[in-house]
Image (cartoon, rainbow, N blue to C red):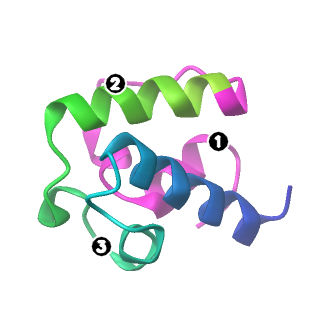
Amino acid sequence: MRDEAIRQRLAVLVSEASDGEITAAEAVAAPSLALLGVNSLATLRLIDAVEKEFGVALDLVDATVLDSVVGLAGCVGAPE
């Protein structure tokens, strides 16, 4: 999967994890998902979805990488 396609897919996962309260376009453009209102429940849903879809185990110690689509892309192997 190409880097841009990975970021777009992650943005869709953010939207789904937030029950549609955040659009994929908002997620991909945001410097911080927290600024968009992604709460702890949505974050847990997002972590689960990313781990299942991309077959990775996210490092929850460094939560800063979980706060943006770019950071998440780096975790699944797509360079920033």
**Viewer-closest of 78 and 37:** 37
Kindly identify which numbered label has been placed on residue 31. Answer: 3
Task: Rate crowding at label 2 as few (under 14), some (14 to 19) or many (20 or more) other CA atoms within 10 Å.
Answer: few
Mark 2 / mark 1, whichever is N-terminal: 2
Q: Is residue 62 visible?
A: no
Q: Position of residue 25 (x, y in %)?
A: 45, 77
Q: Is residue 28 above or below residue 76?
A: below
Question: The disc labelled 2 sits on which kind of residue?
Answer: Leu
Q: Secondary structure at mark 2?
A: loop
Disc 3 to disc 1, how far (Cα)? Answer: 18 Å
Q: Position of residue 7 (x, y in %)?
A: 61, 63
Give the residue at mark 1.
76
- In the rendered structure, the answer to whether residue 33 lies left or right of residue 79 reads left
For residue 51: magenta?
Answer: no
Residue 43 falls in image quadrant: top left
- Quadrant of the drawing holding the C terminus: bottom right
Q: Position of residue 14 (x, y in %)?
A: 42, 51
Kindly identify which numbered label has been placed on residue 10. Answer: none
- Quadrant of the drawing holding the N terminus: bottom right
- In the rendered structure, the answer to whether residue 9 lies left or right of residue 68 reads right
Kindly identify which numbered label has been placed on residue 60. Answer: 2
Question: The disc labelled 3 sits on which kind of residue?
Answer: Pro
